[in-house]
C-alpha cells in the first residue's frame, strides 16, 4: 500500500513540472509579442514626433520667406543649386537691381537643422504660378502668366535607415505698396457710371420742398452735355447740369434748392441723359415727395433752484449743494440735457426725473464747495431731442450772495 501511494506522489510531481514548463513557454511567447508591440508603438511615436517637427520646420521656413519683401523673394541664378524650373513651373529669378538686400533672398542650397538628435535637410524653392482665372500661357490666352509666387519647403530626414520626406507650400501676391496696380484702361464706350440723388425722400410743406436736392452724375468718358428731366405732373421740365470736374467733363452736378414748388407730392422719375463723343446714355432714379410732419420745438422752461435764489457763498465756495430742476417741452426722458455755469466754469449732465404732459423734467446738482467769485452766475441749459437732433439752449442769470463766514449762510 505504501508503495502504491509513493508511486502516485511521484506521478503527480512529474505532471506539475510539465505544467510549469508549459506555463513558462507560454509566458515567454506572450512577453515576446508584447515587447514587439511596444517597440513598434515607440517607433511609430518617434516617427510621428519627427513628422510634427518636420511640419514645424516647413512652416517656419515658409513664414520666413513670406515675410521677405516681394522683389527679394526670389532665387539667385548664380547659386550652384539654382534650377530654372521646379515641378513644371518657372523659378522666380532674383534681380539685384530690384532687391534692396540680396542677402535675405531664399537659399536654394539644402541646409541641415539638427533637432532632438535628428538631422533635417531643408530645401527651399520659389516659383511663379499662372492663375487660370485670367487665362493660361499654355493655352495662349494669358500674355502675363506670372500672377503670383508660390513658396515650397521640403524637409527630409532618415530614421533607422529609412528615409522620410515632408513638403508644404504657401502663396503670396504683392501688396499695392510693393507693386502698384495698373490704371484701368480707358473705357471704349460712353456710359453713365454713377447716378446719385440725395435725398431720395424729400419733405414738402405747403407745396414747397423743405430740403435741397443734389444730383451728381459720373460718366466713363467726357460728356458734352448732361440734362435732368422730370416729367409731368412736375413742372420742373428739363434742366442742364454743371461740370464739376474742372473741365474734364466726367463729373456733373445739378442742385435744386429748398423751397421749390415744381414737385407735387408723390413719386417722380428723375431721368438723366448724358451725351459724349462716343455716344449717349440714360439713367433713372425715383424720388418721393411727401408732406413733412410738423416739428415740435424743444423749449426749456425756467429752472427751479433748491435751496432757492440767491446762491449762498461763504468765502468763495458754495455753502451747500444746489439742485437745479427744469422742465423741457418737446423731449422725452430718453433725450439729453446738460447744465453748465460761469465764473469758475463747471458743468454736469442732467438726469431725467419724470415725463411731463409736454415733455420731461430733468435735474442736476451744483456741488457744495464750487467756487463763485462774482455777484451773479449764468446757468446755461442745453437740451437735445435725439430722434431728429433738434437742439435748444437757454441761459438764466442767478444772483450770488457772498459772506465772509460760511456760518452766515442760511
Image: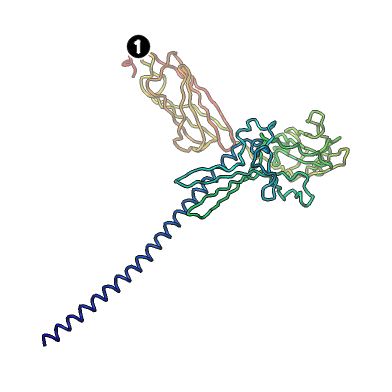
Q: Report the side of 75 relative to 13 (left or right).
A: right
Q: Nearer the viewer, residue 11 or 73?
A: 11
Q: Nearer the viewer, residue 318 or 132?
A: 132
In the rendered image, residue 148, in percent from the top left (x then y), is placed at: 68, 43
Residue occupied by mark 1: 404
Q: Quadrant of residue 80?
A: top right
Dot 1: within a 10 Å radius of its alpha carbon, few (fewer than 14), some, or many (20 or more) residues? few
In the rendered image, residue 218, in percent from the top left (x then y), is placed at: 78, 37
Q: How many marks can you see?
A: 1
Quadrant of the drawing holding the N terminus: bottom left
Q: How is the image coloured?
A: rainbow
Q: Is residue 167 above or below residue 5?
A: above
Q: Report the side of 65 relative to 8 (left or right).
A: right
Q: Is residue 20 above or below residue 357?
A: below
Q: Nearer the viewer, residue 271 or 217?
A: 217
Outermost residue, left side? 2
Q: Looking at the image, can residue 343 be seen?
A: yes
Please tell me which residue is depicted at 51% across the width and 55% down the height of the picture: 162
Quadrant of the drawing holding the C terminus: top left
In the rendered image, residue 267, in percent from the top left (x then y), is placed at: 74, 46
User: For the residue labelled by badge 1, is the local secondary structure a helix, a strand or a loop?
Assistant: loop
Outermost residue, bottom side? 1
In the rendered image, residue 65, in percent from the top left (x then y), is placed at: 59, 40
Please tell me which residue is depicted at 65% across the width and 30% down the height of the picture: 100
Q: Quadrant of residue 122?
A: top right
Q: Looking at the image, can residue 210 be seen?
A: no
Amino acid at each position: 500500500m505504501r508503495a502504491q501511494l509513493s508511486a502516485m506522489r511521484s506521478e503527480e510531481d512529474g505532471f506539475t513540472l510539465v505544467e510549469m514548463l508549459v506555463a513558462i513557454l507560454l509566458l515567454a511567447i506572450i512577453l515576446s509579442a508584447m515587447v514587439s508591440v511596444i517597440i513598434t508603438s515607440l517607433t511609430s511615436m518617434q516617427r510621428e514626433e519627427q513628422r510634427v517637427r518636420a511640419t514645424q520646420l516647413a512652416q517656419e521656413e515658409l513664414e520666413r520667406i513670406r515675410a521677405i519683401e516681394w522683389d527679394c523673394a526670389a532665387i539667385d541664378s548664380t547659386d550652384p543649386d539654382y534650377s530654372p524650373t521646379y515641378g513644371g513651373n518657372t523659378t522666380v529669378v532674383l534681380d539685384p537691381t530690384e532687391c534692396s538686400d540680396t542677402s535675405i533672398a531664399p537659399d536654394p542650397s539644402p541646409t541641415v537643422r539638427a533637432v532632438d538628435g535628428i538631422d533635417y535637410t531643408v530645401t527651399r524653392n520659389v516659383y511663379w504660378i499662372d492663375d487660370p482665372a485670367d487665362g493660361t500661357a499654355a493655352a495662349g490666352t494669358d500674355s502675363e502668366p506670372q500672377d503670383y509666387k508660390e513658396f515650397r519647403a521640403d524637409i527630409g530626414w532618415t530614421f533607422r535607415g529609412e528615409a522620410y520626406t515632408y513638403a508644404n507650400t504657401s502663396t503670396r501676391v504683392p501688396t499695392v505698396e510693393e507693386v502698384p496696380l495698373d490704371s484701368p484702361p480707358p473705357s471704349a464706350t460712353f456710359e453713365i457710371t454713377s447716378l446719385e440723388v440725395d435725398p431720395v425722400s424729400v419733405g414738402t410743406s405747403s407745396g414747397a420742398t423743405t430740403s435741397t436736392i443734389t444730383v451728381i452724375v459720373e460718366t466713363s468718358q467726357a460728356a458734352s452735355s448732361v440734362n435732368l428731366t422730370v416729367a409731368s405732373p412736375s413742372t420742373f421740365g428739363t434742366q442742364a447740369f454743371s461740370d464739376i470736374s474742372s473741365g474734364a467733363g466726367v463729373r456733373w452736378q445739378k442742385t435744386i434748392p429748398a423751397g421749390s414748388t415744381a414737385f407735387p407730392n408723390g413719386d417722380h422719375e428723375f431721368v438723366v441723359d448724358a451725351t459724349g463723343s462716343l455716344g449717349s446714355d440714360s439713367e433713372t432714379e425715383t424720388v418721393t415727395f411727401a408732406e413733412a410732419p410738423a416739428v415740435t420745438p424743444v423749449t426749456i422752461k425756467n429752472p427751479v433752484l433748491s435751496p432757492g435764489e440767491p446762491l449762498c457763498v461763504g468765502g468763495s465756495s458754495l455753502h451747500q449743494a444746489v439742485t437745479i430742476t427744469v422742465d423741457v417741452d418737446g423731449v422725452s426722458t430718453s433725450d439729453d440735457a446738460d447744465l453748465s455755469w460761469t465764473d469758475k466754469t463747471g458743468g454736469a449732465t442732467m438726469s431725467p426725473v419724470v415725463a411731463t404732459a409736454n415733455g420731461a423734467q430733468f435735474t442736476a446738482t451744483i456741488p457744495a464747495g464750487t467756487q463763485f467769485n462774482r455777484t451773479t452766475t449764468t446757468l446755461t441749459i442745453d437740451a437735445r431731442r435725439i430722434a431728429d437732433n433738434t437742439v435748444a439752449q437757454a441761459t438764466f442769470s442767478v444772483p450770488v450772495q457772498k459772506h465772509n463766514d460760511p456760518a452766515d449762510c442760511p
